[in-house]
Amino acid sequence: MAFLLFSCSSDPVNDTQPDPPDLSEADGSPMDVLGLWDNPVPTLASGTTVVFTGYSNSSQSARTFINTYAASAGLTFVNCALSSNALENWVSKNLASDCDGDNVSLTMNMIATQGQWDLDTFGDVIQTELPKLYDQLKARYPNAVHAFYPGEPAHWVDPSRCPRICEPLRYRTGIEVRLAVEALDKSDAILGPYLHSAIGEPNASDVEFVCEDFRAQDPGCSQGVANQHPSDSGQAKVALIYDRWLQGSGGY
C-alpha cells in the first residue's frame, strides 16, 4: 500500500485552535487502521529485558505499565525514560549509555522533539536525530531490537502551549518516525506500539483517548482543554496498548 505523505508549509502550526482535526489518510482513518503503521512485535525470549526510553509522558506511562502488568509477564522491564528529555537531549547527552538493563532483547523508544514548532524543521530533526539515537542504543544494547513510536494524541492541549505541543505535531511525529525507521533499513529497527488516535475513533489497539485522559487545566475538561501530560486514566490506556502489543512477543 502506498504511503501518503502530507505536504506542509514552513509556517508554524496555527496556535489559535487547541483541537484541530486529525491529519489522516484519504478516508479519514488513523495511520495504523489503514495498515500504514506496520508494527509486528518481535519474538522475545522469556527472562530477557525490555527497556523504555523517552521523555516525561513515556516515563509516566512506562511506570504505570510496569506496576500493572510486569508481575505477570515473563520479561523484566526497566524504565529509563527521563522527564524533560526528548529526542535531541537523548542524542546530545547520549543518555542511552547510562541506561540499566542486562540481557536486553527490546528497547521501546517514545519519540518527541524537544522544542521544534515549524513543521519542516520538526521533520528534519527527527530524520537526523533518530538514526543517531538508534546508533547509541545499538552500542549500548547490541543484541536488542529497537522499537520507535510517537506518543499519545494532543487534541486537547491548552492553547497557551500551542503550537509546540498541539496537533498536528504529535500525529506528524508518527509520519516522520515511520519514514526515519524505513530509511534506516535495519532488521533490528522497527515501529513500536501506535498510541495516537483520531478524535472519536479508536486506534488499532481499540483505544480512544478523551480529554479526561490528560491532566485537566479546568475541572472535568469543561472547556475542552487539558495539559499535555496523561492523567491516571491516560497512563492506563498507554499501558494497555503496551500490554496488548507485547502479548504477541512469545516471551510475555
Image (spheres, helix red, strand yellow):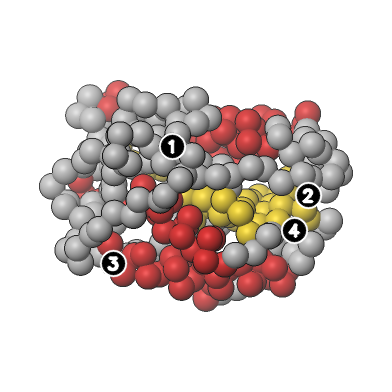
The single residue placed furthest to the bottom in the displayed view is 92
Q: Which residue is mark 3?
A: 120
Residue 49: which numbered mark, if any? 2
Q: Nearer the viewer, mark 3 or mark 2?
A: 3
Q: Does residue 221 sit above or below 161 in this rendering?
A: above
Q: Is residue 85 visible?
A: no
Number of labels in the image equals: 4
User: Disc 3 versus disc 2: distance between alpha carbons?
Assistant: 36 Å
Q: The C terminus is located in which quarter?
A: top right
| Tag 4: amino acid | Ala
Per the image, label 2 sits on a secondary structure element best described as strand
Q: Is residue 191 visible?
A: yes
| Tag 3: amino acid | Asp
Task: Point out residue 84 in the picture as x, y percentages from the top left corner.
Answer: 46, 59
Q: Residue at x 60, y 65 (%)?
A: 185
Q: Residue at x 40, y 51 (%)?
A: 3
Dot 2 alpha-carbon crowd within 10 angstroms: few under 14, some 14 to 19, many 20 or more: many
